[in-house]
Image (cartoon, rainbow, N blue to C red):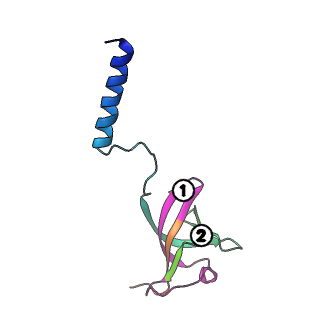
Amino acid sequence: MSLRKIILTNFLIVLVICFSLNVGFSQGGKAETLSFSGVIQSVSKDNRSIVVDKKTFSITHDTKILDQNGKALKAENIKANADVAIDAISVRNGLQILKLVIIRDKAI
Protein backbone atom coordinates (compact mmCIF):
# COMPACT_ATOMS: atom_id res chain seq x y z
CA MET A 1 0.00 0.00 0.00
CA SER A 2 1.40 3.39 -0.89
CA LEU A 3 2.00 6.15 1.67
CA ARG A 4 -0.69 8.25 0.02
CA LYS A 5 -3.33 5.53 0.49
CA ILE A 6 -2.31 5.01 4.13
CA ILE A 7 -2.65 8.74 4.90
CA LEU A 8 -6.02 8.94 3.13
CA THR A 9 -7.28 5.83 4.95
CA ASN A 10 -6.20 7.18 8.33
CA PHE A 11 -7.81 10.54 7.61
CA LEU A 12 -11.10 8.88 6.66
CA ILE A 13 -11.02 6.74 9.83
CA VAL A 14 -10.50 9.84 12.01
CA LEU A 15 -13.28 11.66 10.16
CA VAL A 16 -15.72 8.76 10.67
CA ILE A 17 -14.84 8.62 14.38
CA CYS A 18 -15.40 12.37 14.77
CA PHE A 19 -18.82 12.21 13.13
CA SER A 20 -19.87 9.16 15.13
CA LEU A 21 -18.95 10.93 18.40
CA ASN A 22 -20.85 14.09 17.40
CA VAL A 23 -17.71 16.17 17.55
CA GLY A 24 -18.58 19.57 16.12
CA PHE A 25 -16.33 21.73 14.06
CA SER A 26 -18.22 25.00 14.42
CA GLN A 27 -17.31 27.64 16.95
CA GLY A 28 -20.87 28.82 17.38
CA GLY A 29 -23.13 27.93 20.23
CA LYS A 30 -25.38 29.40 22.82
CA ALA A 31 -23.79 32.28 24.68
CA GLU A 32 -23.59 32.15 28.46
CA THR A 33 -26.05 34.45 30.23
CA LEU A 34 -24.43 36.91 32.61
CA SER A 35 -26.34 38.57 35.47
CA PHE A 36 -25.76 42.08 36.77
CA SER A 37 -27.56 44.44 39.12
CA GLY A 38 -27.03 48.05 40.04
CA VAL A 39 -28.12 51.60 39.41
CA ILE A 40 -28.36 53.07 35.92
CA GLN A 41 -25.76 55.82 35.66
CA SER A 42 -26.81 57.04 32.22
CA VAL A 43 -29.18 56.30 29.36
CA SER A 44 -28.41 57.14 25.73
CA LYS A 45 -30.67 59.67 24.02
CA ASP A 46 -32.05 57.00 21.69
CA ASN A 47 -32.61 54.51 24.57
CA ARG A 48 -30.36 51.96 22.83
CA SER A 49 -27.74 51.71 25.59
CA ILE A 50 -27.31 52.20 29.32
CA VAL A 51 -24.38 52.38 31.71
CA VAL A 52 -24.52 50.42 34.99
CA ASP A 53 -21.49 50.21 37.29
CA LYS A 54 -19.26 51.66 34.54
CA LYS A 55 -20.32 48.90 32.10
CA THR A 56 -22.12 49.81 28.88
CA PHE A 57 -25.02 47.56 27.85
CA SER A 58 -26.78 47.65 24.49
CA ILE A 59 -30.55 47.38 24.18
CA THR A 60 -31.99 45.71 21.08
CA HIS A 61 -35.48 45.12 19.76
CA ASP A 62 -35.23 41.64 21.36
CA THR A 63 -34.54 43.02 24.85
CA LYS A 64 -37.35 42.29 27.31
CA ILE A 65 -37.96 45.27 29.58
CA LEU A 66 -40.06 44.49 32.67
CA ASP A 67 -40.93 45.95 36.03
CA GLN A 68 -40.38 43.87 39.15
CA ASN A 69 -43.90 42.43 38.86
CA GLY A 70 -43.28 41.13 35.34
CA LYS A 71 -45.26 43.85 33.54
CA ALA A 72 -43.80 44.71 30.13
CA LEU A 73 -42.39 48.21 29.80
CA LYS A 74 -41.09 50.26 26.88
CA ALA A 75 -37.57 51.59 26.44
CA GLU A 76 -38.88 55.07 27.28
CA ASN A 77 -39.43 53.83 30.86
CA ILE A 78 -35.69 53.41 31.38
CA LYS A 79 -34.38 56.32 33.45
CA ALA A 80 -31.07 57.19 35.09
CA ASN A 81 -30.80 56.39 38.82
CA ALA A 82 -33.20 53.44 38.53
CA ASP A 83 -32.29 50.17 40.25
CA VAL A 84 -32.10 47.35 37.71
CA ALA A 85 -31.38 43.65 37.35
CA ILE A 86 -29.90 42.61 34.01
CA ASP A 87 -29.48 39.33 32.15
CA ALA A 88 -27.04 39.88 29.29
CA ILE A 89 -24.76 38.10 26.89
CA SER A 90 -21.31 39.03 25.73
CA VAL A 91 -21.27 39.96 22.06
CA ARG A 92 -18.54 41.13 19.73
CA ASN A 93 -18.95 44.81 20.60
CA GLY A 94 -19.82 44.56 24.32
CA LEU A 95 -22.72 43.40 26.46
CA GLN A 96 -26.23 42.97 25.04
CA ILE A 97 -29.22 42.94 27.38
CA LEU A 98 -31.60 40.01 27.05
CA LYS A 99 -33.80 41.02 30.00
CA LEU A 100 -33.87 44.25 31.98
CA VAL A 101 -35.94 44.42 35.17
CA ILE A 102 -36.57 47.89 36.59
CA ILE A 103 -36.94 47.68 40.36
CA ARG A 104 -39.21 50.43 41.61
CA ASP A 105 -39.82 49.34 45.20
CA LYS A 106 -36.86 47.92 47.07
CA ALA A 107 -37.63 45.46 49.83
CA ILE A 108 -36.35 46.52 53.22
Secondary structure under the numbered disc 2 in the rendered image:
loop
- Residue 32 appears at what percent x and percent y? 42, 58
Give whichever of discs 1 and 2 has the lower sequence position.
2
Left or right of 6 on screen, residue 79: right
Magenta stretch in the rendered image: 67-96
Secondary structure under the numbered disc 1 in the rendered image:
strand
Q: Quadrant of residue 45?
A: bottom right
Residue furthest to the right: 45
- Residue 87 appears at what percent x and percent y? 46, 68
Mark number, residue 48: none
The quadrant in which the C terminus is found is: bottom left
The quadrant in which the N terminus is found is: top left
Q: What residue appears at the point 42 percent right and 57 percent down from the top-left corner? A: 30
- Residue 99 appears at what percent x and percent y? 48, 73
Identify the residue position indicated by label 2 in the image: 60
Residue furthest to the top: 2
Q: What residue appears at the point 61 percent right and 77 percent down from the top-left corner? A: 80
Looking at the image, which is closer to me, 84 or 8?
8
Looking at the image, which is closer to me, 41 or 3?
3
Left or right of 36 on screen, residue 14: left
**Crowd tier of the residue under label 2, counting other residues whose Cα lies within 10 Å: few below 14, some 14–19, many 20 or above:** some
- Residue 88 appears at what percent x and percent y? 48, 65
Q: What residue appears at the point 55 percent right and 72 percent down from the top-left corner? A: 62
* Amino acid on which disc 2 is placed: Thr
Looking at the image, which is closer to me, 92 or 67?
92
Q: What residue appears at the point 57 percent right and 62 percent down from the top-left corner? A: 54
Measure how far apart labels 1 and 2 are at the Cα level: 12 Å
Residue 82 colored in magenta in the image: yes
Residue 75 colored in magenta in the image: yes
Placement of 64 over or under 5, stated as above or below: below
Mark number, residue 91: 1
